[in-house]
Amino acid sequence: MALPLIRGMNEMQHFQELKRRVLERYRQDYPYFQGDWKTFSSQDILNLIALLERECKETVSEKWIYTHLKPETNTKLPRKNMLHVLCRFVGVSGWDEFIFEPVTIGSTVVSKEETKRSKRGYLWGIGMGVLLLAVAYFLWPEKKVTKMPPIKLQNQYTQEAVDSSEVQVYDATQTVGAQPLTPQQFEEKVREKPLTVFVKSPFYKDTIVQIPPTSSVQSPPVVALQPDDYAMMVKAFLKADITDWQKRKTQLQQILSEDLEVMVMLKGGLGAEFYNKAQFVQKLTIPTPVLKRWEIVDIKNEPDGKLKVIRIKQE
């Protein structure tokens, strides 16, 4: 009767290790997050859902993450098919391979015999991890150069870090043909003298701020961005599971312009789709998996703040 109990304890320890590695994998795309599951925000949850769909082609609900990943301790394992999804996300073929690896607590090995059996597979996994990192380095160079320059962006009201992929920074002194600054360009411009930058995002109000020279500061300057509440609502509607479609429909009617124009740029150069207000409201109140692959790239507002133009790319 003791064997099932011991195995169950080992599997739960493996699950805690899997949760830790999911956070490590999440930080590869969102390096500004340095917390744990306790501090994992609702925006982080939406980001993780999008990552799992992109990397594993699987949909996970917010409720599932709150139930199984957010708690500091777990009393039971999730379904095995969901464990497989998380394992693939961290670079392992599935749960069976993951629990074959030894689990350590401090310097104590849980099972010496298991460690011996899995040593070859463990070394193979390290080799594959190095290979995957090398492939990622050469295949995704653009992603490297589009990371935020060394300034800390945060939400003016919540003080939470702003997703750098949703922000573009321009040299405010260049008015003709200006392009977003890469980290290298930013560092060169601000190394010895102050730089006035224009920060633009579809989800935050345009902001102009002067950045002091990096040679005179000890830590990245903090730039507070004022969120566009209506844009944030639409973003949440695209990613979150629907709970009250009638309430969502009413809210959309209030925040969208009567002359709304929505353009969705299709993947693979297949052109674009256009929606008016009625069509877009219907699209968002009858959610489908394709909505979670939509990414807002630009928004224009009317003087009263209502959203008049929305441009979206399909991942």
Image: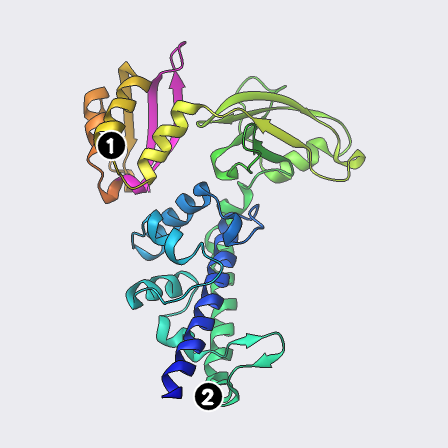
- Image x and y of residue 191, in percent: 74, 35
Front one among 137 and 282: 282
Residue at the disc numbered 1: 284
- Image x and y of residue 174, in percent: 60, 20
Residue at the disc numbered 2: 117
Quadrant of the frame with the C terminus: top left
Which residue is found at the position 41% from the left and 69% from the top?
92
- Image x and y of residue 155, in percent: 54, 31
**Is residue 307 found inside the magenta-colored segment of the image?**
yes
Answer left or right for 40 relative to 5.
right
Tell me the element at label 1: helix
Reply above or below: 200 against 57. Answer: above
- Image x and y of residue 288, in percent: 22, 41
Task: Say what amino acid the circle numbered 2 marks.
Answer: Arg
**Is residue 314 found inside the magenta-colored segment of the image?**
yes
Which region shows up in magenta?
291-315
Tell me the element at label 2: helix
Query: What's the magenta bit mostly, secondary-structure-wise?
Result: strand
